Amino acid sequence: MYFKSTFFEDYQLGDKRVTLGRTITETDFVVHAGHTGDFFPHHMDEEWCKTQPFGQRIAHGTMVLAIGVGLTASEINPEAFSKGYDRMRFVKPVHIGDTIHSEITISEKGDAKRPEMGTVTEHLEIINQRGEVVMVCDHLLLVKKKF
């Protein structure tokens, strides 16, 4: 992890970066359940899940988001501020043993209320080892202009 100043003008529509992968473990499920209090059987009860159409435990969507976003945090941009995430969708389930990575594409740029800033949207896709998109969202940034 390192600091790299990237200003509004440096972002180019269509630019893309791809992260390394991360295998989801049972420990991830247990730790996330402990952090959130979400002990629903869909995530924690292997035997019950065998009786359901999906047949196995499903990762917490919020955990997949947190890990997928965390994978993108390889560089710190002191010129940008996160405004949040829009249009988040859980597209496919993630299971113990799946390996996910994130792909980030600059999808929009625009003006901000403050003239010294601009807005940048990073479209985030979290993808499993089979190349299937499992989650999508848009990361909204407020970014300083060079002036």
Image (tube, helix red, strand yellow):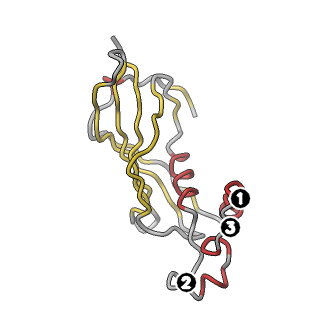
Q: Which residue is mark 2?
A: 55
User: Label 3 sits on what residue type?
Assistant: Phe
Q: Earlier in the sequence, mark 2 or mark 1?
A: 1
The residues bearing labels 1 and 3 have C-alpha atoms spaced at a distance of 11 Å
Which residue is the extreme one toward the bottom? Answer: 51
Q: Is residue 91 left or right of residue 47?
A: left
Vertical comparison of 38 with 103: above or below:
below
Q: Residues within 10 Å of mark 1 (few under 14, many from 20)?
A: few
The C terminus, quarter of image: top left
The N terminus, quarter of image: top right
User: Label 2 sits on what residue type?
Assistant: Gly
Residue 140, image x, y percentages: 40, 37
Residue 131, image x, y percentages: 39, 64
Q: Which residue is mark 3?
A: 39
Q: Earlier in the sequence, mark 1 or mark 3?
A: 1
Residue drawn at x 62%, y 70% as measured from the top left: 43
Residue 84, image x, y percentages: 46, 39
Q: Residues within 10 Å of mark 3 (few under 14, many from 20)?
A: some
The residues bearing labels 3 and 2 have C-alpha atoms spaced at a distance of 17 Å
Q: Nearer the viewer, residue 93 or 132?
A: 93
